[in-house]
Amino acid sequence: MRLHQLSLTSPTLLLLPHSPPSLHFKRCRISSSTTRNHSHNRFLQPMSTSRLQKLVPVAAIATEDAAGPNGSSAAHEDDESNGGYRLPPPEIKDIVDAPPLPSLSFSPNRDKILFLKRRSLPPLSELAKPEDKLAGIRIDGKSNTRSRMSFYTGIGIHDLKDDGTLGPEKVIHGFPDGSKINFVSWSTDGKHLAFSIRQDQEDDIGSKLRVWVADVETGKAKPLFHAPDVFLNAVFDNYVWVNDSTLLVCTIPLSRGSPPKKPLVPSGPKIQSNERKSVVQSRTYQDLLKDEYDEDLFEYYATSQLVLVSLDGSVKLFGEPAIYTSLDPSPDQKYVLLSSIHRPFSFNVPCGRFPTKDDLWSADGKFIRTLCDLPLAEDIPITFNSVRKGMRSLNWREDKPSDLYWVETQDGGDAKVEVSPRDIVYTQAADAPEGEEPKIFFKLDLRYGGISWCDDSLALVYESWYKTRRVRTWLVAPGSHETPRLLFDRSSEDVYSDPGSPMLRRTPDGTYIIAKFKKEDKEGTYLLLNGSGATPEGNIPFLDLFDIDTGDKERIWQSDKEKYYESVVALMSDQTAGDLNVNELKVLTSKESKTENTQYYIQHWPDRKAFQITSFPHPYPQLASLHKEMVRYERRDGVQLTANLYLPPGYDPSRDGPLPCLVWAYPGEFKNKEAAGQVRGSPNEFPGIGSTSPLLWLARRFAILSGPTIPIIGEGKEEANDSYVEQLVWSAEAAVQEVIRRGVAHPDKIAIGGHSYGAFMTANLLAHAPHLFSCGIARSGAYNRTLTPFGFQSEDRTLWEATDTYIKMSPFMSANKIKKPILLIHGEEDNNSGTLTMQSDRFFNALKGHGALSRLVILPFESHGYSSRESIMHVLWETDRWLQKFCVSNSSEDIASKNNESKETKGSEDKAVASGGGGAVAELEDNGVDDLHFHTRSSLCKTILVLEQQLVTGYLKSYLAGVPYQLLRIHNRLMLCNVYMKGWLLYRPYSLETKTKQTCMRLGYN
């Protein structure tokens, strides 16, 4: 069975050992529009021909981080742009360096717990290892697995006693010290563990993964294969228990030779053709195949030979080598469903859309039949709820020995097509006679969303539709012809109406089905609904006993709402056959508070006595007495908003006065105001602080407004993004006003920050509401929406369908308006759709071209999220330096002139709100030149700025409308002016009139 684990989040950083002097790294690329030339750091000398440098002991770097009262002082000014990784102040570093807590996994029989021990953050040297970017994934060729995999360092087993106490730890042993452990999996009977190990070795053999098995009772582990040259291929699926003593393993084919070599001279040009005029629209995917060599290399690494291996070491080949993506044994262990992908591959979409084949095999390795072979799916529309044509979501019924079910779309996969039904669910037995037609199980008018199986009398079928946020749950009796009954019909955004999800029980076959309950004093069939319990006071999780015949509910458990936040994690009393007795219920719960770390308990019915089974220490005791409060406020259009306000330990507003404040947010889209205003989360949840969390700055005496709701609402047929900027400003304005009203934030010392779409938000707020914030921090964002022309986030219109919206939402197009300091951070190897690293590069160039106070930090080898210790520590140093300099000190502005700027900004903002959308040109016309926030030497300069912005917009619209290329070449220079013209206007005012006339004449403007 697959490992079901509880991940206990905590700081996951430890001091890493020093790397050998010969090891080289790319240096963090730092650009700043305000930096001067300084002498190089005496420890980190740049190499003469590249951006590489020698890694030095972190202690040597730490000596440079001597700080004043706020940890970051003017002493850093002279070396702020030096190469080399830096460390944040000790009060932040100490929290991040706290040892990580283990992850937990319960045995199938619920009588044992695994403690999976984790390491700290990896060194940058691990990220620097070669990787191949192929078909949307990244492969470590040396290990033949996905690159950048985390791992466990050890496994401990504890017996779980009836009174909830744990027995002594039994350590899994027998494998080499220093092994990296992955893919931990229980056997169905819970007597064995399977896992892979690898080691850091220079040779290719030592780095590859081997499968090991351990006896749970003794803790002794041994290699699964006797032969030393059998290695795991973990590019896609890796292995699965077929029964209690046999595994099906994806191995590297023994006959495989060396990787294909890239030809020095290509065999021909790279050609893509659409001579059939197919409509192919795709999001901005990254790491795609580029040429025939990439195709060969992908096939080389992804191809596996399946091997059936017993615990005694006997081996049998299973089928032919192929790119297997999924191995799925039937519940009765008689069959195996194999999914694979094959050529022709694509240069336009990732491997998930390559041709895919599903085959049915017997468990002993005999081919039975092909269930489907779907072609390449490049043409799936970008509209939400669009899907692949043909059979999809092919699975085994969890409540049957070997029955298959799947879904087929009736709208051609295009969500824009109106048809009824939209999806049909089919079922068929694995041993069905050849030529037998599958049975229609259910027809859906919305998009299929999954099935929870129980038995022939009960299954729950889910369907949903994104555009309306509608979700429906149907009660079906699979074994009869009874008419399905609509159980729930609600909006996915309406969290207050969420009835909860049925609790599942584990079967002896290792599958999970709906648990049915009975009461001693009543007839009927009951489900146990586990809900988050969203209320206007915050989430109060619950368990409801639900009568499926009458719809009546009885609340049998609810979280403490005064001090603690509790939730039900899993059902622990599911070993009994038949319906379960409510009075014999046993569940695993978690419990936490604002100041107490998450702990786990076993609760028994009917007395509901709780036994604590974990006792984890507080991960950051220096912040144990922090203040957390869920605050509520309202924005100007009446939408109710919430946020978590954190204040440092010992802080008293009346005594200490207002603090510098960091607002960290991420916008969300909604279809109605009421749902957008609902409270999500609990005020009593423990404040988990990750390695790049804004809450780290509580240790620096900041107030933190974390996760303020930033709803972007589009009611009815309105598109939310058509008024994105206006709603964004309203929400930010309300949040800032609230922290100022409470007296906890200084109005001139409020910073805004975010990651990914939150970075996009940050840049927009500095462009359109600079009076609210002293500076901004934007990590891994996308800033020019014309570079994601086929949709982004929840936007499924194309650039050509919503040109004005794309332009107006793009902070790149408003780079000339950004006058507050902005720190841009981006991973050099960002693989997230849409957030290419060049988004930050080009945005920084646009800012620098307008003289904006800005800084760009590119992190070598890092992806969309940052993982190495060197990178994370440096990100924290950069962030702290920025906040100390431009928020605490607020040295970026002449504060005496701030009020005048605020009045101008506020006036232009009101005009933007009044326009209600209307596109980029309309916005400029309504707002006038004051909204540009650019102080030129004459009114003529201001007039030219407006004209230039309108011409740029006109160029883009003309391009989208298909204006001939020769004519558009004339416009090309004008597009560059969007970055550089501002400096020209300032320093060459004598040529304005002449240059403007010439440009206008060429473009046909009289």
Image: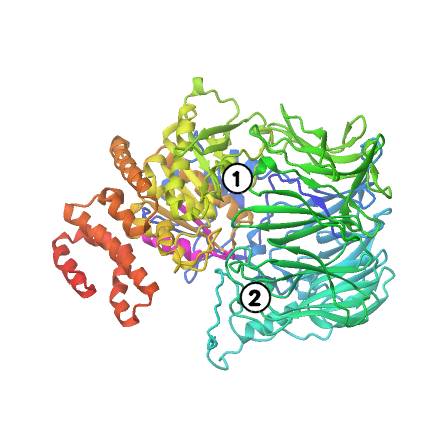
Q: Where the C terminus falls, by quadrant?
A: bottom left
- Tally the marks: 2
Inter-mark Cα distance, 1 to 2: 31 Å
Q: Which residue is mark 2?
A: 134
x then y, percent, for residue 479: 80, 53
Can residue 414 be seen at all in this image of the molecule? yes
Q: Is residue 207 magenta?
A: no
x then y, percent, for residue 461: 68, 50
For the residue pair 362 and 703, the one nearer the viewer reads as: 362
x then y, percent, for residue 771: 32, 36
From the viewer's perspective, tell me whether residue 421 is left or right of residue 973: right
Q: Residue at 81% across / 70% down in the picture? A: 433
Q: Which label sits on residue 693?
A: 1
Q: Residues within 10 Å of mark 1 (few under 14, many from 20)?
A: some
For the residue pair 169 and 464, the one nearer the viewer reads as: 464
1 or 2: tag closer to the N-terminus? 2
Q: Residue at 60% across / 48% down in the picture? A: 17
x then y, percent, for residue 321: 72, 72
For the residue pair 284 and 477, the one nearer the viewer reads as: 477
Query: Which region is colored magenta?
Result: 823-846
Could you say whether the residue bearing mark 1 is in a helix, strand or loop? loop
Q: Is residue 832 magenta?
A: yes
Residue at the outermost bottom position = 267
